[in-house]
Structures are given as C-alpha cells and as structure tokens.
Image (cartoon, grey):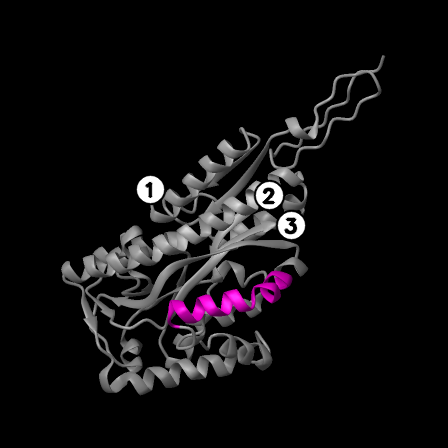
Amino acid sequence: MSKAIHRFAPVALLAFAALALPGTTTTTKAEETYTLRIATLAPAGSSWMKVVNAWNKTLQEKTKGRLKIRVYPGGSQGDERDFVRKMRVGQLDAGIMTMTGMSMIVPAMIVLVLPGFLDTYEELDRVRAKMAPQFEAMFEKEGFKLVGWGDAGLNRLFAAKPFRRPSDLKALRPWVWKDELVFVELYDVIGANAVRLGVPEVYPALQTRMVDMVSSSALTAVALQWHTRVKYMTGWNSAIIAGGTLMRKDKYDALPPDLKEVFDSTAARAHDLLNRSIRNDDRKAYEVIVKKGIQAIDAGDAKAEWDAAYAKVRENFTGRLFPKSLLDAVAKAAEP
C-alpha cells in the first residue's frame, strides 16, 4: 500500500489537499486550516488593530479554528509599497492600506482622494456604494479582491510654524509620503519643497526638523505621535484618507466555499465597524489636540487660493491617472 503524499505550503493560507491512493488516510478540505497574513501600518493597540483583532477572534470562533488572521502591524512588513510587492510575490496574502498603496495596483483609484473633491463622508460613501462593482472589477483585473473599505479620518495639514495661504508652504519643509501621488502634485503646484520619506521616518524627521509640516488625520497624528511636534493645523480637510483591504484573488479563491462565506460576512461587518469607529475616534482626536493647544487655522480669504490649487491638481491628473469620464462618474455618484 502506498503512503499518502502530503504537500503543505509554507504559508498556512494556501494548503493543498493531500494526495493519496485508495485505502489510505487523507486530510479532507473540512480539516484543513488557513491563515491569512495581513500587513498594516496601523500601530498595535490602535483603533484599527482593535477591530482587526476582534474580526480575527470571530473568524476563528465561527470556523472552529480553520480560518484565522495573522496581522503584522505598525509597518513591521515595511511601507505600503512593500505590502504590494510582497503580496505580488506571495509573501503576504493581504494588506490593509490607504489609497497610496491601493493606487499602486489601480492608479485610477486616486480619484477618491483628490483634494477638494470628495471631502465629506457622505459623498465618499455614496460613491463607493454606487460604484462598487466597477471598482471591484478594476482590482480583480489586476489579480486582487477588494475585501472592504476602510478610512483613516479627515485629511488635514499640521505644521510646527503658522501658515494660512498655499504660498506660505514655500517657507516650510512639508513631508510627503514618497509613494503618495496627491500631495507630491499639490506641493509641486504650490511650489513648496517637499521632503519625501516613508511613514516610519516621519516622527524622527519632525524631531530633527527635517520636516515641519505633515498631511494627516487627527487620529493618525495622535496614533503616530506626530501631534506632539506640531502647533498648527488646518481647520478644514482637503479630502478623506480613504483606503481598504486588498487580498490576492488566488488566495481568496483557494478558500473552501464555507470558509469564504464566513470570511465575506465577517469582513463586511468588520469594515463597517471599522469605518464607524475610525470616524468617531478621529472626531475625538481632533477635539483632544485642540484642547492640547494645537491651533486650528481658518482659510478665510485664502480659501479661493486653496481651491485653485486643488483644482489644478485634479486637472493635472485627469487624462494621466484616470479618464475624465471616471472623474465625471464619481462626481455624479457623489450627489444625493
């Protein structure tokens, strides 16, 4: 009698059914276990991680331990560029990312975070709900499954020195995420000399004054301790820091039907809870940093200048990163 041949992949998500001759003992699909390796920049103990940990607990309970999540928080797997690269080569199965990482896969998705375009949650929610099939298809074409949407708060500018007009930024050293497209373009339009750094490098750069301005939500600024190095912030937001969870489609497709069903239902609930939690926590974080003495700046008569800079960014991207038809479709979908 031949021995059963067992092949187990070194990662737990992709487990092959054992091959065996009749009469031998085999491992059935119902007995296999799967582990999803997910990376995120969110620090351990943050609002994001609390929801993800709760999701993982629910997954394991509902599947009796057959499906679980192994999360790598706090940028331990690198920056979002590294997440995308590692997913492509199979070293990671999924990533919880901002639109910076997601746009490395589908550049046109940057349309959701254009400055001065979708700057309320209501608008963003309407667009993502109405255009979900189109967005999902765009990622599937690239070999990824859009598991769910996740936000990181209202995008503001924070600085160590006072500012009000776009031209004031020329005297500052704003940080720009080296892979982020919107603020690279915005600072170019304004004429500011941005310093390109990865997210883990920002806090040390604020300490040494290599940079003295950052774009962030209040919640992210608190979570990463950036708020301890600034004194001013915009009272308005230019956009929502939108993002989501992406998974390799082949890894998702490899899950048995019963595990897919549990994964889909729990993922939907987790991302809904995540967005509600983040939005509430971002509002509270804003109130906290105001109480700590960070001054919210009113654009006042400089609003027209900011709006003109935002419009120029959208103009520069249209036809380069996305067609005008997509921009128009998103604008229409944002309407009540």
**Label for residue 249?**
3
**Residue 272 highlighted magenta (yes or no):** no
Hey, which quadrant is residue 174 in on the image?
bottom left
Say what amino acid the circle numbered 2 marks. Answer: Glu
Quarter of the image where the C terminus is located: bottom left
Residue topped by disc 1: 45
**Label for residue 261?**
2
Which is in the foreground here, disc 1 or disc 2?
2
Q: CA distance from mark 1 to mark 2?
A: 28 Å
Q: How many marks?
A: 3
Q: Which residues are magenta?
A: 119-138
Q: Secondary structure at mark 2?
A: helix
**Residue 121 highlighted magenta (yes or no):** yes
Q: Nearer the viewer, residue 153 or 22?
A: 22
Hey, which quadrant is residue 18 in on the image?
top right
Give the residue furthest to the top: 1
Would residue 164 appear left or right of 9 to someone viewing this image?
left
Quarter of the image where the N terminus is located: top right
Are the residues tagged 1 and 3 within 8 Å (C-beta)? Answer: no
Give the residue furthest to the front: 336
